[in-house]
Image (spheres, helix red, strand yellow):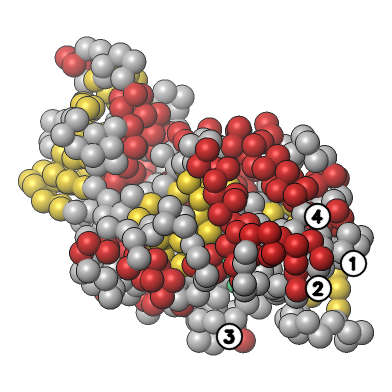
Amino acid sequence: MKRLLVAATWCLLACACGGTIPSDGRIAVVPRPVSVVETEGVFRLAPGVVVACEAGDAVCGRAVAALDEVLRPIFGRGAAVRASGDGQQAQVFVVRDSALGPEAYRLTVAPECVRIEAGGPAGAFYAVQTLRQLIPAAALGAGNAAAVELPCATIEDAPRMGYRGAMLDVCRHFFTVEEVKAMLDLMALHKLNVFHWHLTDDQGWRIAIDRYPELTRVGSVRRRTLIGRDPGGEYDETCRYDETPHGGFYTKEQIRDVVAYAAERGITVIPEIEFPGHAVAALASCPWLSCTGEQYEVRQTWDIDDRVFCPGKETTFEFIEGVLAEVLELFPSEYIHIGGDECPMTFWQKCPHCAARMRSEGLTEWRQLQNYATARVERFLNAHGRRLIGWDEILEGDVTPTATIMSWRGAAGGVRAARQGNRAIMSPSEYCYLDYYQSEDRDAEPLAWGGYVSVAKSYSFDPFADLTPEQQRCIVGVQGNLWTEYIADWAHAQYMLLPRLAALAEVAWSPAGGAYDDFRSRMERMRREYDACGFRYAEHMFGE
Ligand code: TNX
């Protein structure tokens, strides 16, 4: 009895001080790697692990930083990782292999050491994200583990698509820099590499522009917010409002901080400045930008608004180019998103400036006025070495061959774009809209925009359907979108993002032909990662 007690005390002590945590014995990586070959044995990873590095090499620097971030919550102490030029005492070797693509990696876990070969810093970062998923789930957040065992394997991996995106709408509801960084963390975990930041819309202008301080002084706050479902234009006394003003914007310093934070995680930030529709916050700030010059309020309801920029006036183009000049200084991304969706022409049709523009440009249809405005902004962006992205509405009429189309009203826009040789990003609402309901039982869910996108539905998306191999090359990526009309806080946002974003990440990263059941079983391990990181998620897919 006494012996037993001593043994039990020992065990408790060992656990409290952190023992070696054995391997889960199973490899469950999301998104699914190109190839996983399991081999014999386990590798024992302990605090103070030494990484053999070539001094100053960016691949190595990225691997060490990422590894430190992964191991700190497991081992707790300060330097969980130590870089060394001396291979003698190292357990982890990081090597640049220029035969691999910039995001590709090979991860070899053997009983005596771990080897990371990567084509570039992003590849090294992704190798560590994979290694993170080999760590036993019981160790996540342990804080004081003495060591952990990883199963031995050779994993070769590279993404199927170069653009793996997620969009956050910070206009309908504002999210702080800390919350945006949490979104970037969540994306990095899934090997997503493009953060599309929806920064301007009818209900709020969220980016500081020095030339036009009124955009944030006036345009970043709305007086009140419609509660409940939007009646679609029929706003009367039955509508209820939250009378608390809602606002927020990012300073240039904050934006630079977010862009740098993203870059450290292999993520490019693409800003979206909506033009010529979804403009009410801009018009409320600078009334001279609309057709009538009337003073509007920042919008308090949702859906489509008739009040848009006036493409008849030259001053409108001076404005948008002035704004974009400052945007380009903040965002080094090749792509700049100019919106272009849902732009009614009601005001244009009554506007003398727009009529004059139609005549001087020889335009015969109103739709062509949007084409004209978009092409003009594209020339400005191209002259500064950037490319334009627009929502699929910009395909109507004459789109330039150099514009990239973001297909949201189904995949048809992307298919049409690819067939005519335009690049496209696939974000069709029926697979990629993360603001839609995720369960059939709507009453059991918080109010959502509408629609129904289950995890299985997102997972089943084939971005290359109906295209020849030649046309498929025009499809540069896949993106999940989170519009936030009915999502007022970050906890709710996470609930909508996860786990559907994981399904889309696998569509964008992994070779075609994945089986949903296999994905679901691998997601059990990812779920533990969500728990350890403190991410909220919807539970529908788990344990069904
Ligand atoms: C359509 S998608 C919009 C957004 C809304 C969204 C709601 C797109 C380009 N425009 O303004 O927030 O539907 O799902």
Of pointers 2 and 3, the one earlier in the residue sequence: 2
Q: Disc 1 vs disc 3: Cβ atoms closer than 8 Å?
A: no
- Label 1 residue SS: loop
User: How many C-alpha atoms fall within 10 Å of the one at disc 3: few (<14), some, or many (≥20)?
Assistant: some
- Give the amino acid at mark 2: Lys
- Give the amino acid at mark 1: Glu
Mark yes or no: residue 172 visible.
no
Across and down, in percent, residue 460 comes to: 32, 74
Q: Which residue is mark 1?
A: 243
Q: Nearer the viewer, mark 3 or mark 4?
A: 4
Q: Nearer the viewer, mark 1 or mark 3?
A: 1
Q: Which residue is mark 3?
A: 442
- Give the amino acid at mark 4: Leu
Of pointers 3 and 4, the one earlier in the residue sequence: 4
Where residue 283 sits, quadrant-wise, is bottom right
Q: Residue at x 65, y 72 (%)?
A: 366
Question: From the viewer's perspective, is 237 left or right of 26?
Answer: right
User: How many C-alpha atoms fall within 10 Å of the one at disc 2: few (<14), some, or many (≥20)?
Assistant: few
Q: Residue at x 38, y 52 (%)?
A: 163
- Label 4 residue SS: helix
Cα distance in 3D space between marks 2 and 1: 34 Å
Q: 147 or 197: which is nearer to us?
A: 197
Cα distance in 3D space between marks 3 and 4: 41 Å
- Label 3 residue SS: helix
Specify the label residue 289 is tagged with: 4
Q: Nearer the viewer, mark 4 or mark 1?
A: 4
